[in-house]
Each structure stands twice: as C-alpha cells, then as structure tokens.
C-alpha cells in the first residue's frame, strides 16, 4: 500500500466532513459508555476501526491512477521534478454549449426513394467516433459576443485592423429580395434583442470556421483561469499584440499575451520548485488534461449521424427500420396526443405558406424560429431539421468514397505545420505581419490573426516515404477526375495538365473561376469568368450544407440530403453549429449492457 496526498479540493472537503461526523459520533458513544463502565475495551476497538478507515481513505493500490510509474517505478509528479502527468484524469469535460454523442456504425446516405435523382448520396456504411455537438445552432447573441471581442481587440478604427472586423461581420444584405420587402430583417435580425436567440445567418463557411477557432481560445482561456494558471479576467486585457491563442500557449506559452508575466503568472496557482530550486509546472500542457480539444464544424458523417438520432431504434446489433426525419415516424406532424397535429420543425409547408394561417400557426414561424422551439431528437439536439440549414466541414463531391475509407469519413484535409524561426521557436504573427487574402467575392480576410502561430503547408519533411498521405492538400483525392488516376502523368508535362499537381480540381469539376485583383490604389478589379467551356459549379472551394431550412420544403428535412454552396458566400437560410472531438473512452461511464 502506498499513500497519496494529491487529492482534489472536493475530496479533501469530503474527507474532513467525514472526520468531523465520526469524531462527533465517537464523542457521543464515549459519553454513553462512561455510564455503562465499558469504556476501555470498546473505545480501543472503535479507535482501531476509525484508524483502519482513515488508512483505506488515504491510501490506494498502485495502478492507472497511481503516482508511481509502472514502467520504471519512479515517482510521477514529484515535487522535486521529473515526469509530470495528470494521473487523476477521469474523462473529458463537456465544454460549454455541447452535448455528448456516442459514436457508432450507421448507414450514411439516402434510404428513401431518390425522387430528385441526384445520385449523390448512395447509401454506404460508415463509423464515426464519439464526439460532442452544439445542442442548438449558433445564435445571434453568441455571434455578437464574437464580434464584440474582435472589435475590442482589433479596433476597426485603426486602418491595419479594419479588414479584420469587416471580414467577420455577417452579410445582413442576404435578406433582400428583388420582389420582397425584408428591410426590417436587414436592419434588425443580427443585433436586435428580439432576435437574440435566433440562429445567426449571413455567415459564410469561412466565417463559421473562424468563429469556432475563436471559441476554442476563449473556452481554454476560461479553463486556465479557473485552474489558476492565468490571471482572472485576462480576457478583458486582450489587445492586438497581447492576447490568448490555444496553439500559441501549447507551443510557446511565454509568447502568449505578448509575454506579459502579470497575466501568465497572475493566477492563484502556487509555483512549485524542484530540488535545484527551479520553478516547475508554471504553464499547463496537454499532459494536464486541462486544455480542451478544438471547437470545429462537424463533418458531414458526424452531422448526419447526430441528426438521425438512431439510439432509440436499436435492436441488439441492428437498427429497426429506416428513419426519414430526426424524429421517429414518417410524417412532419406530431402523433403525440397532447400536441397531435403540430409540426415538428420549421419549414416551408407549400407555395406561399411559410408559417400557416394567422391566429394558429402550423409551425410557429415564418422566417427562422427561436432555438429550442421544437423538441430535441434522441441525442438532445434541437433543430436538426428545419429552421436553418447548416454548414458542415466537408468539401462537396457527388461521391462518398467509402471504398477508400469508412472510418470518420471527411473530404477536405489540408495539412499544415507551424512556421519555425531561425532560433528554433514558433513564429507568432505580429500586428505588422498580417497577411490578407482577397476572396473571389471581393471580401478581404486575414490569413492568421495577430497572436496566432503562422502556418505553412507540410512538405517532403513530413510526407517522404509515408503511406497514409503524400501531400498537403487532399481535397480532390480520388474524386473521379483525371488527376485522381494513378496513370495521370502531370509531372511529365501532359497536355491535359493546366497547372501544377496540387492546383484546383479541373476537368470533371470545372467550375467558373472569377478573379479579383487589387490595383496600386487599393481598388478592386473584378474579372468575371465568361468562358463557355465550364462544365460544373463544383471546385475545391464549395462546401456541403445539411438539413432543411425555413425556406425549404419537407423533402430537404431528411438528414441524408446534401447540397453545396461556395465557402466564401452566405445566405439567409444557412447557419451552423460547432462540434468537438471526444478524447479517451468511446462511452461515458460504464459500457452499456447488451440486453
């Protein structure tokens, strides 16, 4: 038996409370025994029992949670230094706004009749790992918090930062219609409190990804404050050249907050010193288990799996029947006696019918509805059909290549690595080093924000002699075009080749290529692609969106339906929600019984 005194605060409180109760009981018993003249023998036995109990509470066998290494026998987490590791970690904490989705195998794709003959969602079996997903779509209020932080940290009054704030603003003009009066939404939908809990729209795929990155940093900043690594309220002191980035903190913590030690060392955590008098455990690392995985957009497979909510129709190792909607049943109206006949989602009923007859609405909304207006599915997710369609992470292709991969399927991998300076440290973007990209629609966005680590594509250092990947950009891998053929001889100057091997997909997915250039005066020169040789609207910059919206007929409410839209454009019917990967066990708690 080896004693361990590394208790959490809660454990210490519980032990102390237990001791107080035992001592009070012991006092009462002693008082009683005095009257019975049996004090000496029984009291000694009671004291022995108490001592044994305390020993059992304070000691435990060496094992997975022990502070002794099973590899070397050396002590882990010694105050004198050496290997530091969180041996008390139990499971990942559910981050703000998320619900847990236990992964599994399911049939991805359309299981009903394909009346549109799209042939782009043929059923195939996939397996997704456990993950977390937002219980609701990201709301206007959530997005306004993001805008507020950006505005405070990168003031748009300064010319160098103006494009940063403008680049994250939703496009409120998406509400306009040539033959409709919607100016009230154009002016009020994003900012008015009456729409605060409505899903944000007018957000492009690129903007949704940037929101998820920002959310990751803010949540991890909160965790580090709570555990005493960072000064409380540090988020209020963030500036353009001194703010918090999760990746920067992990790779080079002293460059976070511009190296401001008052913030980096201003938490309640007491510094530890090793035998040599050097400070240790000053900064949190991945080994602490404290830093959360990143918020991100869900993959198409994850979104479809979560929307189906198959957990309630399982029969041993097979799903009973087929699901057409995120709820049980084959109809959009409820069969529940209490709410019989009510619509179960916010969608377009028919031509000119977005909400029903005045006084008694079919679905309670004409445009979007407040989140949580309808019952959640079996995973606890709201509005996985209707309200707004949602961006997912994947690049669109008509095929889902399950022959190559059937585990955590995702098309869109572009692998990057951190830029390393001459002195061997990571390069953190400064306020005078911001690189802006001009999108095809004319919007200007920063490639990396100040305070973040500069990145670049992986190269031969990472890909040489690898079998699992051989290039940075894998968006058009095995997508059916001629470049995906093993016999494509681009390197030998084949006439079919228009550019380098890693350029945009061509031939089969030959979308228009509009061009934007900036002249010496800073004016945009727009060049429209007027070629009559274009064969599709698909390229490497179109992303999948899933689920029907307030503007769609019920056909699109099926979770298997998939459509695509340019990643740099926005609409009044596409929003998004975030997801997060699960680390550790597949299930929460005990494994479920088979019967």
Image (tube, rainbow, N blue to C red):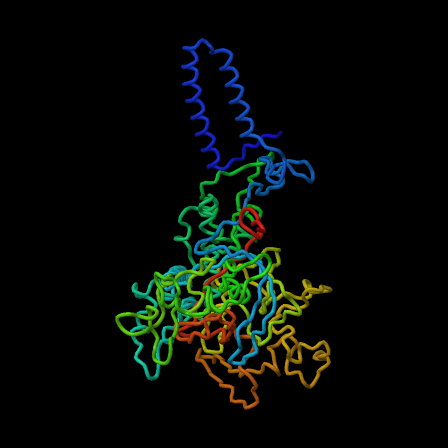
**Residue 464 figure quarter:** bottom right
Could you say where residue 229 lies in the image, as x and y percent from the top left? 48, 45
Query: Residue 445's spot in the image, x, y percent?
Result: 47, 70
**Is residue 416 visible in this depiction of the protein?**
no
Seen at 58% across and 35% down, the residue is 79
Q: Is residue 472 above or below residue 58?
A: below
- In this view, which residue lies farthest toward the top? 37
Report which quarter residue 421 is drawn in. Answer: bottom right
**Most foreground residue, 85 or 491:** 85
Q: Is residue 524 visible?
A: yes
> Percent position (x, y) of residue 351?
37, 81
User: Among all residues in the image, which is located at the extreme front?
Assistant: 337
Looking at the image, is 159 positioned above or below residue 3? below
Q: Is residue 399 left or right of residue 568?
A: right
Number of numbered discs visible in the structure rendering? 0
Which residue extends farthest left? 359
Q: x, y (%) of residue 295?
A: 50, 59
Residue at image position (58%, 83%) is 510
**Residue that extends furthest to the bottom in the rendered view of this protein:** 532
Q: Residue at x 64, y 83 (%)?
A: 498
Q: Looking at the rendering, in which quadrant would you find the N terminus? A: top right
Would residue 200 appear left or right of 484 to someone viewing this image? left
Q: Nearer the viewer, residue 329 or 481?
A: 329
252 in relation to 489, above or below? above
Quarter occupied by residue 315: bottom right
Q: Nearer the viewer, residue 368 or 272?
A: 368
Left or right of 387, for residue 482: right
Seen in the picture, residue 181 relative to 368 is either above or below; the reply is: below
């Amino acid at each position: 038996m080896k004693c361990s005194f590394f208790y959490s605060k809660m454990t210490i409180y519980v032990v102390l409370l237990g001791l107080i109760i035992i001592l009070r009981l012991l006092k009462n018993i002693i008082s009683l025994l005095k009257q019975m003249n049996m004090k000496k023998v029984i009291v000694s036995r009671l004291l022995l029992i108490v001592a044994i109990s305390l020993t059992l509470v304070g000691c435990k066998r060496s094992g997975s949670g022990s502070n002794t290494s099973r590899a070397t026998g050396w002590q882990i987490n010694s105050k004198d230094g050496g290997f530091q590791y969180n041996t008390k970690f139990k499971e990942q904490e559910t981050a703000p706004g998320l619900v847990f989705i236990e992964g599994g195998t399911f049939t991805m794709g359309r299981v009903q009749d394909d009346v549109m003959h799209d042939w782009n969602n043929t059923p195939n079996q996939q397996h997704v790992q456990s993950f977390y997903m937002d219980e609701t779509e990201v709301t206007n209020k959530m997005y306004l918090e993001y805008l507020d932080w950006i505005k405070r940290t990168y003031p748009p009054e300064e010319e160098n930062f103006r494009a940063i704030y403008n680049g994250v603003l939703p496009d409120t003009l998406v509400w306009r219609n040539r033959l409709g009066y919607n100016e009230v939404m154009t002016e009020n939908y994003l900012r008015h409190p009456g729409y605060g809990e409505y899903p944000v729209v007018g957000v492009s795929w690129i903007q949704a990804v940037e929101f998820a990155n920002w959310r990751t940093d803010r949540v991890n900043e909160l965790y580090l404050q709570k555990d005493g690594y960072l000064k409380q309220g540090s988020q209020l002191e963030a500036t353009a050249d001194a703010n918090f980035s999760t990746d920067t903190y992990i790779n080079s913590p002293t460059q976070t907050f511009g190296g401001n030690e008052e913030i980096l060392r201003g938490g309640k955590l007491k510094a530890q010193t090793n035998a040599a008098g050097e400070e240790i455990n000053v900064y949190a690392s991945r080994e602490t288990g404290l830093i959360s995985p990143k918020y991100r957009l869900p993959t198409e497979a994850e979104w479809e799996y979560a929307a189906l909510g198959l957990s309630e129709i399982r029969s041993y190792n097979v799903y009973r029947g087929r699901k057409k909607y995120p709820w049980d049943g084959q109809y959009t109206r409820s069969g529940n006696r209490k709410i019989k006949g009510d619509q179960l989602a916010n969608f377009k009923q028919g031509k000119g019918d977005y909400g029903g007859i005045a006084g008694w609405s079919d679905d309670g909304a004409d445009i979007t509805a407040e989140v949580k207006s309808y019952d959640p599915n079996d995973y606890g997710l709201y509005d996985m059909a209707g309200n707004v369609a949602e961006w997912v992470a994947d690049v669109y292709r008509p095929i889902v290549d399950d022959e190559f991969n059937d585990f955590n399927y995702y098309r869109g991998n572009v692998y990057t690595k951190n830029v390393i300076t001459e002195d061997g440290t990571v390069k953190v973007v400064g306020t005078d080093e911001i690189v802006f990209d001009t999108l095809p629609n004319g919007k200007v966005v920063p490639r990396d924000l100040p305070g973040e680590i500069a990145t670049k594509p992986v190269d031969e250092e990472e890909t040489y002699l690898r079998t699992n990947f051989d290039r940075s950009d894998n968006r058009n891998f095995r997508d059916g075009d001629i470049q995906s053929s093993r016999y494509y001889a681009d390197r030998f100057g084949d006439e079919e080749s228009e550019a380098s091997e890693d350029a945009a997909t061509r031939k089969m997915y030959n979308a228009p290529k509009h061009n934007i250039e900036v002249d010496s005066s800073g004016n945009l020169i727009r060049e429209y692609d007027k070629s009559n040789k274009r064969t599709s609207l698909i390229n490497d910059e179109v992303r999948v969106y899933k689920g029907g919206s307030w503007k769609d007929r019920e056909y699109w409410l099926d979770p298997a339906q998939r459509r695509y839209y340019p990643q740099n454009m926005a609409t009044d019917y596409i929003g998004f929600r975030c997801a997060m990967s699960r680390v550790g066990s597949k299930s929460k708690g005990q494994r479920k019984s088979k019967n």
